[in-house]
Amino acid sequence: MTETSPHNGADNGEKRRHNNRLTLSIVVAIIAAIVLALAAPSAASKLHLGGEVFLRLLQMVVVPLVMASVMSGILGLGDVRRLGRPGFLAVAYYMCTTVLAVLTGLVVVNVVKPGVGIDKSLVEDAYKKGAGRAEDVSKMGGSAKTVVWDQGLTSQRTQAGPSDPVEVPHGKPMDIKLTITQIGDATAAAVATVETSSDGKEYSSLKSFDGPEQQGKVKHRLELPKDAHYVRVNFQPQEGGDRSAVAAEVIRGPPTMTDIFENLVLMLFTNNLLGAMVSVNLLPLIVFSIVFAGMLTTMGNNGDVIRSVVISINEALLNFILLLMNLAPLGIFCLVAARFGEAQQDGSLLLLLKTQAWYMTTVLSGLGVHAFVTLPLVLFLLARRSPIKFMTQMSQAVLTAFSTASSTATLPVSMECAEKNANVSKRSTEFVLPLGATINMDGTALYEAAAAIFIAQAYAIVDPSYNLGLAEQALVAVTATLAAVGAAGIPEAGLVTLLIVLNAVNLPLELIGLVLPVDWLLDRFRTAVNVFGDAVGAAVVDGAFEAAGEQSPKPAPQPAG
Ligand code: ASP
């Protein structure tokens, strides 16, 4: 089902040799970079600048490329209605493979059980260290793609008695977060009681929390009842010792399923097209491009100029990427050397392998099954293509994904490889790959399911009452799927959305500290799987595009030359 593009002429053999050379150079660059990082970490980390330049060059073309290619894809179809069947197939493919990935993640993590035997001190340590980091992570992705819920109204108290009341916003579930601080050791701990009221006059006590007896801090979080319109904290300072204080913050409760769903719908639209371009918010740009190009197809001769400009820009950008690819071995060498060098320098590389080896093995095995068994089977059964050949054809994109840890930054390379090396039809690459890079993340979905269960297994060591039943596993599966759709194609975006999964099954967000140290490394592997999954999707949906294209009354105008 391959299409012979005009680029595939007599020089096919020469092109293949050039491609093989390029892939080989990238592989050599990655190996050499890792060796350099292990042997001379400080020198390797200085290559950061070169890596950053390459990354920026790739990222620079993403927005114009996505808009031009989606538009030119629709123009090629001649009528936006012909997108119907292939579009439906693409979304069905994304959903099915994401669910398969999540199931693989769940099976592997339940079989290997990497969290079960973990050292208790590691969990307690992660809990302590993770507190601040969970908040940092939840604030990390401030874009429309994340649900940020930590923003609150604060009150602080050191004296005995009730604090001033705080009005609780209506309409959304709200939590109260308490931090009780003890300065100097006490003989009896401070006690903070949360009191709520529906009218602001009569308060009743909801729950009391003890502070620490020794110098230190404890944090508590409590869901507020729906009829609580006012809340205050009644404080009973410590006995003996220096001083104690309580800080209370009324914050949005964890996002509900409705919140997550609403967020996903809103992700499709923007109120500011230029703003979406500036923040590389691709989904609304894709929606706009489809509608705009669809409209162009109905304008007859009046739209000719814009049509041929769009198609020429698209061609020019693809040629630009071809040029960029010649820099890939050098850019990738710098990117990988700098990141691994940094890890080696702060000693985390060896530490990871010692403490997190089982967890890493679990995630990598799951990703391996998905990339080497599930996706090849899908490719073979649905697209009738040789998986090995296809992997070779897409290898530059997969290696770039590993090196950049960003599917968005890899998009230009994926499009180039799919169209020029794997001969996936232009119509399919132009539409399926940009959409896939934004919403289809098999590796991320698998990772989030495995990481959440790993954290649950580890948490059960410190809190044996925590029970991870079938219902919770199902909830992990659903939220991991949605979270992967919502994750941006940027480095470590999966960490931000992992908080949503942890929340859904009532796991302490602080325990993100358990997976944080290895995330930068696992991110590279899951991004590679994300990108490969998108490419398989483009090959699978290819046939439907060909069928739709054949009904096209007139071929799209091609630029001269
Ligand atoms: N880095 C991944 C990507 O760009 C997203 C993730 O963090 O899982 O595809």
Image (cartoon, rainbow, N blue to C red):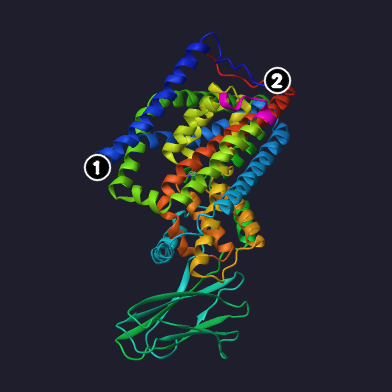
Q: Residue at x 34, y 29 (%)?
A: 330
Q: Nearer the viewer, residue 311 or 340?
A: 340
Give the percent coordinates (x, y) of residue 166: 50, 80
Q: CA distance from mark 2 to mark 1?
A: 59 Å
Asked if the residue at tag 1 contacts the one at tag 2, i.e. Cβ–Cβ closer than 8 Å, the answer is no
Boundaries of the magenta span: 380-389
Q: Residue furthest top?
A: 10
Numbered mark located on residue 554 in the image: 2
Quarter holding the N terminus is: top right
In the picture, measured across the screen, residue 395 lies left or right of residue 386, that is: left
Q: Is residue 154 above or below residue 357?
A: below
Q: Is residue 269 visible?
A: no
Q: Residue at x 35, y 89 (%)?
A: 187
Inspect the image, locate mark 1, and give the three-letter code of the amino acid beneath it: Ser
Q: Is residue 385 magenta?
A: yes
Q: Nearer the viewer, residue 277 or 493?
A: 493
